[in-house]
Image (spheres, rainbow, N blue to C red):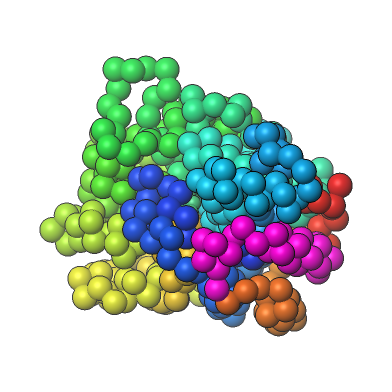
């Protein structure tokens, strides 16, 4: 049977904006209050999806969420019509209002953690939406994320869905951005590598000093239990607190893996040698495991954070080699582009580099890898996926036309308070649920 990895990219939502909401995420803070271009952002994302589809990969689309989130504003005491709720919140609590407008669900690496059927006790693909507790604007995502995932992967014979972990910082879970699966082949049992920022219940362990560690060990362990993973095939690694303090707010800003390749920075982890030895032991000998470490002397952590060298996608092509999907910021850096050119000559599976412009997302700290959720699956499992969410030439042109019809070219901070934006957003999403055949996944449709 054929097995492969599908990537489900977040479609950028109509309220895409720069609100400086993510302390610890350098790009988010440095672009705060700049105007955004939602139409261009959505189109950049669609171009990347189409390019991966054209490379022969299975590519899907994950729908955005309804914003501004007036339901949350009502929970916070704002009353009246939706227009009054928006205008009062914008005036009286502008910071809260900006948070409920974020289109952050576009970064679907944070949507959920997914374990493929080869790894789970019951042989199903398991999904746990991430609670994203560490940032208020992101904590608004998991309920709707769960509904959208269920509408895409609805067949209970193949797919098992869990509720997100308890909404508390002790179980802070940032999803697949901190999860990497290594395997000799997609259909074989793999090693699931969970990376966490801190121990929730042990204050003696190292923690960052400047920026928050969003994800806990205890959250990783809970997801591994829920998914029915075998301890002999799971590794937990702590992120180096010093790199979190340098702006590495998710592990996918400093490491990326695929099949038998782990590409990571020298400073990414705590206790690196012992943990990589455990990874090698659990990985086994069925294939050679390539541990590609980037030294400080080759690329500094600061340069990696600036260019998103590690927030790249490592994808397996049909010819058996891998390509690295990088943002154009990597191409623009002489150090990083030279490093990547050299990397393809080193006799590892990585043979090609493709650069894509996702600048609108990058300005909020979201590179190519943030924009996608990976699901390794068999052809039979793919047949059970809602076919309307899978990219092809027709869906690409339908979604581009949908963006042209509904999205604005510019959103500034003041525009977010325009009640018309909520109407535009709902109209767009209503039409999208029909295009993608998702049913009623949004609160306004209930
Ligand atoms: O959670 N940025 C997102 C970026 C997520 C990137 N994802 C991965 N690394 N997988 C975050 O920090 C910024 C929104 C704003 O400032 O307007 C934001 O939410």
Instruction: Decide: is 132 above or below 166.
Output: below
Residue drawn at x 49%, y 40% is 135
Query: Is residue 438 in view?
Result: yes
- Res 74 → quadrant: top right
The answer to if 419 sits in the magenta stretch is: yes
Magenta stretch? 410-436
Residue drawn at x 58%, y 77% is 409
Query: In the rendering, at what x and y percent does residue 352 appear?
Result: 39, 76
* Extreme residue in the left direction: 297
Query: In the rendering, at what x and y percent does residue 392 appear?
Result: 70, 77
The answer to if 54 sits in the magenta stretch is: no
Front-lying residue, 148 or 387:
148
Give left or right: position of 249 versus 148.
left
Instruction: Check the picture and name the quadrant holding the N terminus.
Output: bottom right
Residue drawn at x 64%, y 65% is 14
Instruction: Decide: is 18 above or below 227.
Output: below
Query: How many numbered circles does the render carry?
Result: 0
Query: In the rendering, at what x and y percent does residue 253 appear?
Result: 37, 53
Query: In the rendering, at what x and y percent does residue 239 appear?
Result: 33, 38
Query: Is residue 5 in view?
Result: no
Residue drawn at x 38%, y 61% is 31
The secondary structure that most of the magenta stretch takes on is: helix
Give left or right: position of 61 versus 358.
right
Front-lying residue, 404 or 392:
404
Front-lying residue, 238 or 261:
238
- Res 393 → quadrant: bottom right
């Amino acid at each position: 049977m054929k097995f492969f990895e599908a990537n489900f990219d977040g479609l950028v939502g109509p309220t895409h904006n720069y609100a400086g909401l993510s302390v610890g995420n350098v790009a988010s803070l440095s672009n705060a209050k700049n105007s955004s271009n939602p139409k261009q952002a959505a189109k950049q994302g669609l171009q990347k999806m189409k390019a991966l589809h054209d490379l022969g990969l299975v590519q899907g689309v994950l729908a955005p969420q309804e914003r501004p989130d007036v339901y949350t504003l009502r929970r916070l005491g704002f009353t009246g019509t939706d227009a009054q709720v928006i205008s009062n919140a914008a005036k009286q609590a502008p910071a809260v209002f900006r948070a409920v407008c974020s289109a952050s669900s576009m970064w679907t690496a944070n949507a959920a953690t997914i374990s493929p059927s080869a790894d789970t006790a019951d042989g199903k693909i398991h999904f746990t939406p991430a609670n994203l507790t560490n940032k208020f604007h992101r904590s608004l995502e998991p309920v709707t994320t769960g509904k959208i995932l269920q509408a895409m992967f609805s067949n209970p014979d193949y797919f098992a869905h869990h509720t997100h972990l308890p909404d508390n910082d002790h179980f802070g879970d940032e999803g697949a951005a901190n999860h990497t699966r290594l395997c000799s082949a997609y259909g074989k049992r793999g090693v699931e590598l969970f990376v966490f920022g801190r121990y929730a219940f042990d204050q003696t362990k190292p923690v960052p000093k400047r920026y928050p560690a969003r994800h806990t060990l205890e959250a990783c362990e809970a997801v591994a239990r829920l998914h029915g993973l075998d301890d002999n095939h799971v590794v937990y690694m702590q992120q180096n607190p010093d790199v979190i303090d340098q702006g590495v707010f998710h592990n996918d800003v400093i490491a990326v893996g695929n099949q038998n390749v782990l590409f990571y920075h020298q400073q990414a982890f705590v206790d690196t040698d012992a943990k990589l030895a455990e990874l090698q032991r659990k990985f086994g000998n069925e294939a050679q495991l390539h541990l590609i470490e980037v030294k400080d002397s080759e690329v500094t952590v600061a340069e990696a954070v600036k260019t998103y060298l590690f927030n790249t996608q490592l994808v397996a092509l049909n010819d058996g080699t891998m390509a690295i999907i990088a943002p154009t910021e990597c191409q623009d850096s002489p150090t990083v582009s030279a490093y990547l050119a050299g990397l393809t000559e080193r006799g590892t599976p990585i043979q090609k580099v493709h650069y894509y412009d996702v600048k609108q997302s990058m300005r909020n700290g979201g590179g190519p890898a943030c924009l996608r959720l990976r699901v390794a699956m068999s052809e039979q499992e793919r047949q059970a996926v809602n076919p309307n969410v899978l990219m092809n030439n027709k869906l690409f042109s339908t979604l581009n036309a949908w963006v042209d019809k509904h999205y604005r070219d510019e959103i500034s901070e003041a525009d977010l308070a325009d009640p018309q934006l909520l109407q535009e957003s709902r109209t767009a999403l209503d039409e999208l649920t029909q295009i993608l055949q998702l049913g009623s996944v949004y609160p306004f449709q209930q």
